[in-house]
Image (tube, grey):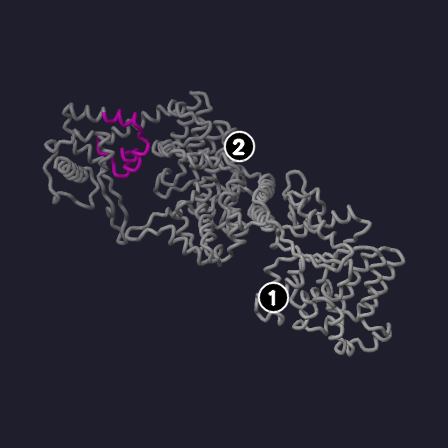
Amino acid sequence: MNAPESSAGPGEVKINLDTEIKLMVHDRLDRKQYARRVAQRIQQAGTGSSVVFGLAGPWGTGKTSVLNMITEVITTENADSWSVVAFTPWSAGDSLTLVEEFYQVIAGAMPTSTEGKRVRRALAAAAPVGSAIIKAVGTSAIEKWIGEGGVQDALLAGKDAFAEKVGDFTAAIEPNPFSERFRAVSDAIQAAGKNVLVIVDDIDRLHADELLSVMKSVRLLGRFDRVHYLLSYDEETVLDVLEKTDLASNNRSRARRYLEKIIQYPFALPPIQQVHLATEFREHLNAIIKAHSVIPATNSVTLTDEDEDEDEDNMNRESIPDLLLGVLPTELLTLRSIYRLCTQVDIMLTLVGGNSELDFFDATVITFIRLHYPALYKQIPRWRTELLGSGTPTIGKKEVTAEEKQAEVARYTDTKDDFENKSVYVLLVSLFPDALPRPKGSYTPTRHAHCQIRDANYFARYFAFGLPAQDIRDSDVRTDFERLTDTGDWSSTSIIREALPIQERRRLVRGKIMQQLDVIADASPQMCFSAAHLLTREIPTDGADLVFSRWSEVLYALTGHAMSRAEPDAARDLISGYRNEFGLSTTADVLARPIELLGINQAKVLAATSEIRQQVLERCMTDLTTAIPRDQRGTHSILSFIHYLDDDLWQQLSEQAQALLHNGDVSVSLASLGARFVSMSERIDSDGNLKVVHHRFESNDFAKLIPRDLWKTDELPIVTQADLRPDDTSLENRTVYATLALRQLVDRAES
């Protein structure tokens, strides 16, 4: 394998067939010169005694591609004097077949001349007896025969043993002993005038008996002058196989010595340079990126109270392959592992539904973990709660250090190498940067993108090889939302509408819509407001406001975009129509948490909602000066609009409230104003009685209405704790609560 070519049409992913290159012109790893020098050294053996060369390198590093380039050099530059053939030992079912095919390969390298035909006849006559020798000469004795005169000595040693096995068959062919047949083959090859290189690739994939049979063949039965061998293998794997044979008896040193006797001239395949690995990795990742329309992470929608993350900006400027190369342990990458990784990422994206359903970076990293550390991959879902958390320890729990967490992860990596374990831990940190402590000396910038594994809505997708049950495809939500904003009406099979009555699916679909807000860009103002009306009618609030469920952000995106695009009068009419149907409180919920979105003009939104703002101001003042009915507190109290009030509205409210205090209006006092900032939550107990389950004085908000320096205890009535009734939410009781709270705060400030 050496960066193989693979067929693919425009916009298609290359299918990695894990095949080698055939010609030097396709070499992209700068190995042409290496192959040429090996070929030159082999050719120097020429007409001399048989030499067994070796090409050693780990699996997946391109040995077969180098063999093909060596073949190309020899056959194109010295075709008259050399013939290169390949021997495939694993196609043989037994030793007789193996020897026959072995000799047939050598015979096939001979010219078509009379001398060449003589070689073929001689090899055909030698094959049956050669098979008997392979069987007769035990592995424990074979080392003795690999030297000068080794073939003849081996023949003598095996004579009695194979005579019984061959029987009358050898006599029927010719009464000559095998040694004479061997010499006949050698003489015939010399007369044919052709040098032969027999290539045996991937001998590390043979079973022990097959491997030993091949080694006996090349060092005993095929040891003809002018016939040379080039064996390709992963040395560690071959040693593992030999070590388990009777020849080595679980002694690795003996296995190594035996290999050294067989392979007389080993060449070590040069390691692939990191620059070439990076090039291959980028090319294959970019092919997947193009095919699945992967878009670099951007953050087009942000809450106004969040700062832009500098790390995120830097990440968006870098290509995804470069980001991956920065975190993946490249020392573990080979050409084969790169192709396998990219193929698996392509499969994962295909099964789940493409880039719109998974984050490409996270999909690649989690796939790498699955391929290289399967036990860790299986463990990650068991850590779901921890990994999707903030990383902040609960009260009373000791904070876990990076070293401790790394040690826990190392239990599932099947390696004792500290450097490798740290690299694996860094991979996990890149996936879950908020939950895992960062190791010292390691920089892993935090990415923010759509469909990331650390998002609870998408976590399961990275382990399901498809869409998990109860999940909804982002692409389907996008199509449905696009239709809603284009037509202002539900489709007959609307996924969004179907999900809204069910809390979990409602939450899920809201998160997906927030990632698809770019579809609003071309929608008309009227269609946007129609969509907002339809959504608001269908969204169950379960007693909570739209801000609590965060649907207000979706509705603001629709209405804010519409008011920004519409003419001023039309914008006011659109928001007034929404207010008329759903009320002032719901409208304020929608406008309370603006989001930054391309196309929304905050100044135009403020202008269009000026009447809404005035109505909110008036409603708040009504609450401050009158006792509103209990059933209206959720929609008519100042506390119900706290989240909507901005600095300008607070200033107006403060000025009017302070004016009422200074004018000596007996119905308005510091305590009565404070009473409106006492929040009391109620619920019905099991006996059907109304109970106050939470009460608090919102002192920070009250300070926006009446500054703290105006809180004077001499302006407060004299009350005691005994005057307070815990389950009473009346204005009178809330005034007592506010008085006690204000006295305590003032006394604390003075002391």
Could you say where residue 86 lies in the image, as x and y percent from the top left? 74, 56
Say which amino acid is labelled 2: Thr
The quadrant in which the C terminus is found is top left
Magenta run includes residue 282: no
Within-10-Å neighbours for mark 1: few <14, some 14–19, many 20+: many
The residue tagged 1 is 255
Q: Is residue 590 above or below residue 205?
A: above
In the rendered image, which quarter is residue 197 located in? Answer: bottom right
Of 583 and 559, the residue lying toward us: 559
Where is 192 relative to 296, above or below?
A: below
Is 639 in the magenta? yes
Tell me the crowding category of disc 2: few under 14, some 14 to 19, or many 20 or more residues within 10 angstroms, Cα based: some
> Which numbered dot is residue 74?
none
Give the magenta-colored segment's residue range. Answer: 625-654
Q: Identify the residue shown where x is 20% and y is 32%.
A: 673
Amino acid carrying mark 1 in the image: Ala
Q: Quadrant of residue 192?
A: bottom right
Furthest-right residue in this view = 114
> Residue 733 at x, y = what percent?
17, 40
